[in-house]
Image (cartoon, rainbow, N blue to C red):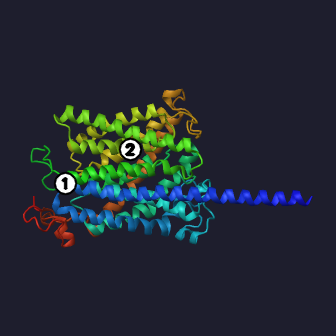
Amino acid sequence: MIGMVLASLAFGAETDAVKTLSVAVDTVWVLFTAFLVFFMNTGFAMVEAGLARAKNTVNILAKNFIVFALASLAYWVIGWGLMFGDGNGFMGLTNLWFVNGGVDKGYSAIGWTQVPLWAKFFFQLVFAGTAATIVSGAVAERIKFLAFLIFSLVLVAVVYPIVGHWIWGGGWLQQLGMWDFAGSTVVHSVGGWAALAGALLLGPRTGKYRNDGSVQPIMGHNLSLVTLGGFILWLGWFGFNPGSTMAVGDGTAIAHIVVTTNTAAIMAILTATITSWLMQGKPDLTMLVNGALAGLVAITAGCAFVSVFSAAIIGAIAGVLVVLSVIFFDRVKIDDPVGALSVHLMNGVFGTLAVGLFAQNGITGAETGNGLFFGGGFTLLLHQLLGVLSVGVFVFVVTLIVWAMLAATMGIRVSREEELLGLDLGEHGQEAYPDFQGFLTK
């Protein structure tokens, strides 16, 4: 009898030790992948700065640096609670403020992962920061610094978490059966719709379009930065997508997600290169980089739900789509200096719909149902389409109102004189390249 008791105690202690180790390993995994996503801020800063003119470099770097601080504050104070708090189908209502002081209670929608609350919070925070960063590129070279800061606070405090609740926090789209594994809609489309609203109200940069309506190209000043940023973002996506497992228990699923992510990226690079070459006569480096990013955005929703072969098709389509989209936005005179709308909005929408086309039920364990191309009919595709439309209408309308309120009160666009001089001197009183006199005004 005593032996049985001792054996039982020893087994219990061993079980507790295994569980403790499991939680520790999962926590390290979640935080490591979150660090990769955080490092994507560097990638966004490099891409945006390189694609802008030298006279606006300080402004762009400052926006990209401070936006994560603002996102962190907004998400800590209220955003997390609205997104993951227990509530209704629209938003969280339980323990809204300051992440409940770190007490993991009232957040049942994310209770499926065993990592500590602060690990969950930080992982979701870096995603929220990404959504705000997307906006920066589309409004670059003419936005007032303070107006952008206030908008970013509102976006991460209210708009982003409400959509996140709908899809990841137990809200109505999640209950309906919409799937978005790592954020083609939650992160990229939200940032894209908000960017579109801002770009429309701001109008194009001075000199972007000639009097006859034709496009006057405004070239970026440093394609080395663009290329470096593209590689950093590509690396960061290996945290963005595989990290969304928020556990290391299923190595097969993690490996599958890594390969679908990479496959979509490389196929998009190739098709973007071919499309650019055919349409523009030369292989445009910026199209190559944005092609990679387009493929990564497009596969983000379905990386855990589609096969590697399907990922290749999704990426191939994304590479063509991003080039056509850049040309389209130029023709309708929506000025987007970095192609953020083409990368994040258009391919966020496409990637979300691609789940409804290419999903294979249980391919990594998730019971998504099959997409249209795998015998599932239109059910999943219609759920994905409803998600795209509802998120698009909500985010665009709300952010358009926010931008309009800022425009009516403090103004959102710098003066013509300041724009021509450069936002570095006008907004910050600094130059990124002070030793190159005369270069900044080009």
Outermost right residue: 1
Residue under label 2, please give it: 296
Rendered image quadrant of residue 419 = bottom left
Which residue is pictured at 57% across the width and 43% down the height? 176
Residue drawn at x 21%, y 44% is: 330
Residue at horizontal 40 percent and vertical 37 percent from the top: 263
Mark in the foreground, 1 or 2: 1
Residue at image location 14% in from the left, 63% down from the top:
416
In the displayed structure, 401 sits above or below 379; it is below
Q: Which mark is residue 222?
A: 1
Q: Nearer the viewer, residue 24 or 57?
A: 24
Q: Secondary structure at mark 1?
A: loop
Question: Would residue 432 be seen by someone viewing this image from the given angle?
Answer: yes
Residue 201 visible in the picture:
no
Residue 226: give x, y in percent of width and height: 25, 51
Is residue 63 placed above or below 177 in the rendered structure?
A: below
Give how far apart the Cα atoms at labels 1 and 2 are. Answer: 23 Å
* Mark closest to the chain's N terminus, 1 or 2: 1
The number of discs equals: 2
* Placement of the C terminus among the 4 image quadrants: bottom left
User: Please, is residue 300 above or below residue 91 in the view?
Assistant: above
In the image, 408: left or right of 395? left
Left/right of residue 153 with respect to residue 440 in the rendered view: right
